[in-house]
Image (spheres, rainbow, N blue to C red):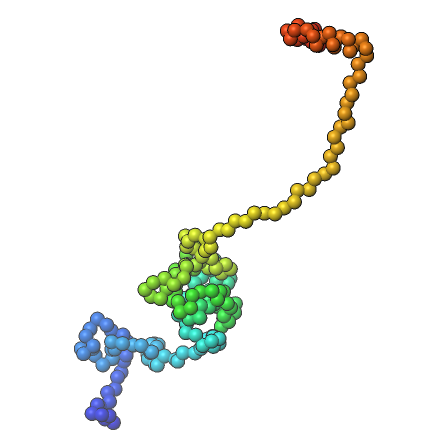
Amino acid sequence: MPYLGFEPMRIERFGGLNTLIDATNLPNYASPDCSDVDFLPGLVKTRPGLTSVFAALGGNPTVNYLKTYITPTVTDSIRTLVLDSLGNLRKEDATLTPGTLSLISSLISPNAYASSVSLFGREYMAFGDGQFGLDVPRQYDDTNLDRISCDGPGLSPSAADEAYAIATTGETQPATVAIVASPTERHKLAAWSQLPRQERMAWWLARTW
């Protein structure tokens, strides 16, 4: 029956999406926009509605980043990364525990968006507000979340004297050695001390050799 001046038209076939022809010139079995529909052999239907996969996030934040990537582990490879507006980065193991989010880090700057690429089994992430960076970039290898910037230390170094005690062990000094000479030797030493220096040296060398 007519509706608002339009007459119903029987369509025998569906041609699907066609963006190469102006929308005003398309035949009645083609469409310039096929959003929210599924095409099956001999059938077109409305696409099923969306279903919430994850439980509600604490604090009711918005989700600012959602990305999947594949790890090198063949039997357990698919991951989903989720960043919310509170700065919480979470992951889902879509292979073993689908629908469960586990916290990776809660130290990302709040209200940051993320953009990332997958390479070498890791996800390289940059954080910003769409115009400027808000946090240092990081890499995630499914185990560790590490910063990858070239920034220097976050704090200046500090120096302080170290207080320590030196332990000493008991030491003894050898007793005084007394040289006792006989009267004859004392007479020779007294006579030797009166000789000129060169003669004393020659005498000493002669006694040594």
Residue 166 locus on image (x, y percent) = 66, 42
Q: Quadrant of residue 136?
A: bottom left
Residue 7, compared with residue 185, is above or below; it is below
Residue 172, compared with residue 136, is above or below; it is above
In the displayed image of the protein, which residue is found farthest to the bottom? 1
In the displayed image of the protein, which residue is found farthest to the right? 182
Tag count: 0
Residue 190 locus on image (x, y percent) = 74, 9
Residue at 37% over, 64% down: 128
Residue at 46% over, 68% down: 88
Q: Is residue 109 left or right of residue 32?
A: right
Residue 173 locus on image (x, y percent) = 74, 30
Q: Nearer the viewer, residue 185 or 1?
A: 185
Q: Quadrant of the C terminus?
A: top right
Q: Quadrant of residue 197?
A: top right
Q: Nearer the viewer, residue 90 or 73?
A: 90
Residue 187 locus on image (x, y percent) = 77, 8
Can residue 79 be seen here? The reply is no
Residue at 77% over, 27% down: 175
Residue at 39% over, 80% down: 49
